[in-house]
Every structure is written in structure tokens, then in C-alpha cells.
Amino acid sequence: MIERLRLSAATLKNDFVRRIEQVAGQSAFACYQCGKCTAGCPMAAEMDLTPNQVLRFAQLGLGERLRGCRTVWLCASCFTCSARCPKGVKIAEVMEAVRVVLIRREMAGPGPQAVKIDEEGLPPIAIISALRKLTF
């Protein structure tokens, strides 16, 4: 007989999950993995993990797995994912929370010196947004 492992939000809530929920201001467990966020993401083709996979890793408290992932740093914060979510999960805010938690734990974050920004032709808000993701 196969024994099934039952996981609940209470058993999965480790420090990483609690910090993401605190920064994002919402439950990480509201997402039921429909994939609409990934389907509408303009950056999904460039990401190594899809937005819904990042959310699943966050739900499972796998901060170590997210440390090496480029997705949280490539997120354009365009809020397309949040607008498409049928549950109203603010996925862009969760992505920002993951970045903040990883930077605070010194698990990731290349720093602004690692970014090569071509300042010509870019609006100032794009430069500010890029640097905001790399500093806190």
C-alpha cells in the first residue's frame, strides 16, 4: 500500500515562507498553479523558471533553490501576471518579496556594479527600476 505524504500550509511555513508573506503582504499559498501568470509573462522566454514555478518554490520554502535562479531578477514587474491571476494573487509583489528576502539573507543579488546599463535611449525610470531590483 502506498502511503501518501500530506502537506499543509502549517507544516510548510518555515522562516523563508513567513518572510515572503510578510514582505508581500499576502499568503503564498493562495496560488493554485493554474499557469495564467506564466502564459501572459512577456519575460517568460528568458527565464530559467516560470513565474508559477517560483511561486511553488516559495510555497515549499525552497529559498536555496531560488538563490541561483535568474527569474526573480529578470521579472519586469509589469504586473501582467497579477492582472491575469484568477485568485487575485499579486505575483509581481511576491517576486519583489523573494528578491528582498534573498538580498537580506545575502543569498543572492549581484549588486549594481555587475549591471551594464546602456543609459542612452532608456527612460530614467527604467534605470531606476533596474537598480532598485539589485539594491535594498
Image (cartoon, helix red, strand yellow):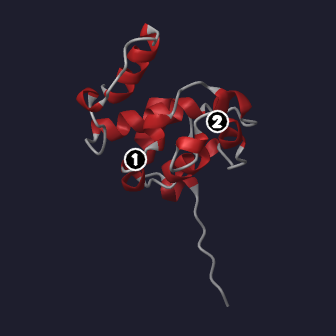
Q: Nearer the viewer, residue 3 or 88?
A: 88
Q: Is residue 65 visible?
A: yes
Question: Residue beneath label 1, please?
Answer: 16
Q: Position of residue 61 (x, y in %)?
A: 45, 53
Distance from Cα at disc 2 to Cα at disc 1: 25 Å
Decide if residue 14 is on the left or right side of residue 83: left
Q: Could you tell me which residue is drawn at 70 percent across and 46 percent down?
A: 35
**Where 66 falls versus 43 (above or below)?**
below
The amino acid sitting under disc 2 is: Cys
Q: Nearer the viewer, residue 40 or 19?
A: 40
Q: Which quarter of the figure is the N terminus placed in?
A: bottom right
Q: Nearer the viewer, residue 41 or 12?
A: 41
Q: Nearer the viewer, residue 134 or 95?
A: 134
Q: Could you tell me which residue is drawn at 40 percent across and 11 percent down?
A: 120
Q: Position of residue 73 (x, y in %)?
A: 43, 36
Numbered disc 1: secondary structure: helix
Q: Nearer the viewer, mark 2 or mark 1?
A: 2
Question: Residue beneath label 2, please?
Answer: 41
**Where 22 falls versus 39 (above or below)?**
above
